[in-house]
Image (cartoon, rainbow, N blue to C red):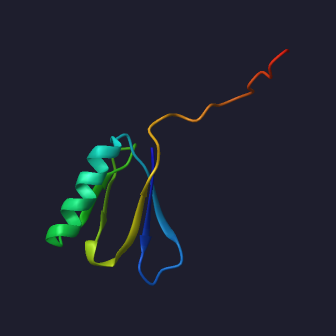
Amino acid sequence: MEIRIGVQNVAREVVIESDASNEDVARLVSDALADGSPLRLKDSKGRLVLVPSTIIGYVEIGTETPRPVGFVPTPGS
């Protein structure tokens, strides 16, 4: 799943690919924003990403369904 984090006063987003569920990420974001602690996320390769919660502008959490890869047959083929 793709997670996009908008940082205040920075034009580029922080983009993370993660194996965590939508609910887990939403809970981590909410907890970090509530108590002012850094947002701690692990990406799909096991790397730890820390973002100070005081500079988070927004967090976009992608869907958990995988995107199809390859050709999709058209009806009637």
Taking the view exactly as shown, the residue that stands out farthest to the bottom is 9
Residue 49 is situated, as x and y percent measured from the top left of the image, at 33, 59
- Residue lying furthest front in this view? 75
- Residue reaching furthest right? 77
Q: Is residue 1 above or below residue 3?
A: above
Give the residue drawn at x 65%, y 31%: 69
The answer to which of 64 and 15 lies nearer the viewer is 64
Position of the C terminus, as image quadrant, is top right
Horizontally, is 68 left or right of 42 in the view?
A: right
| Residue 19 drawn at (x, y percent) | 37, 40
Q: State the image quarter where residue 1 is shown.
A: top left
Q: Position of residue 14 (x, y in %)?
A: 45, 65
Total of numbered circles in the picture? Answer: 0
Q: From this viewpoint, which residue is outermost toward the left?
A: 35
Q: Is residue 19 above or below residue 55?
A: above
Q: Nearer the viewer, residue 11 or 77?
A: 77
Write the residue at 29% across / 45% down. 23
Residue drawn at 84 percent across, 15 percent down: 76
Question: x%, y% of residue 6?
Answer: 44, 70
Along the viewing direction, whichever of 67 and 49 lies nearer the viewer: 67
Dividing the picture into quadrants, the one containing residue 55 is bottom left
